[in-house]
Amino acid sequence: MLWIGQMLTVVAVSMDAFWCGFALGGRQVRLRTRTALYIGAWPLALSLVAAIAGHGARQFVPIGWVRMIGGSVLLIVAVMAFREAVRQWRGEGDRLACGRDASLGESTLVSVAVAVDASMAAFALALAGLPPVTVAVAMAVAHGALVLVGNRLGLYSIGKMHGWYVFLPCGILLVMSVLRFAG
């Protein structure tokens, strides 16, 4: 049961990569598989560093604090995801990945932007006991796959998605945060 919650956290944190890919696809910019691998490399690197730090911090952090710290970090990530969802819902989020051709610089900015919340969640997951390499690889695979899936759906969509479902990632993160606090 614990692994399901942790994998839901990984997917929820990775949903911003999906929306970035979708925004590019909606502008008819196709992401190649190697670009998705590049986008997944940033969460791999940042999440690995954060997960190693979280795993090392487990020795110094009392067990009772692990839930509080992990829940707090997930709550912060949920608030960040909510803010991004509001921007997506209003139609402002598409500017993050705008442009007809995705350059290396744009891909790097998108990659780093989506990797920041991944690294915070990786810290919390490693603090809770998940192995750092597992966390980092899960974050990288989820980000790379979801940016590619989002791009393909965006290429074939007929308009912008402005529904309630942009709030799904922050809702999942909020539930995971509450469950972490509850213990």
Image (cartoon, rainbow, N blue to C red):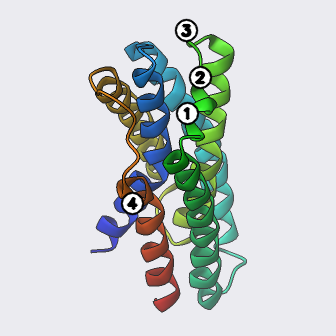
Residue at the image position 46 percent from the left and 63 percent from the top = 130
Give the amino acid at mark 3: Asp
The mark nearer the N terminus, 3 or 4, is: 3
Q: Nearer the viewer, residue 175 or 158?
A: 158
Q: Nearer the viewer, residue 99 or 113?
A: 99
Separation of marks 2 and 4 at Cα, in angstroms: 23 Å
Separation of marks 2 and 3 at Cα, in angstroms: 9 Å
Labels 4, 1: front one:
1
Report if the CB atoms under discs 2 and 3 are less than 8 Å apart: no
Residue for badge 2: 98
Give the amino acid at mark 1: Asp
Kindly state the secondary structure of the residue where label 4 is placed.
Answer: helix
Mark 1, other Cα within 10 Å: few <14 / some 14–19 / many ≥20: many
Separation of marks 3 and 4 at Cα, in angstroms: 29 Å
Residue for badge 4: 168
Residue for badge 1: 94
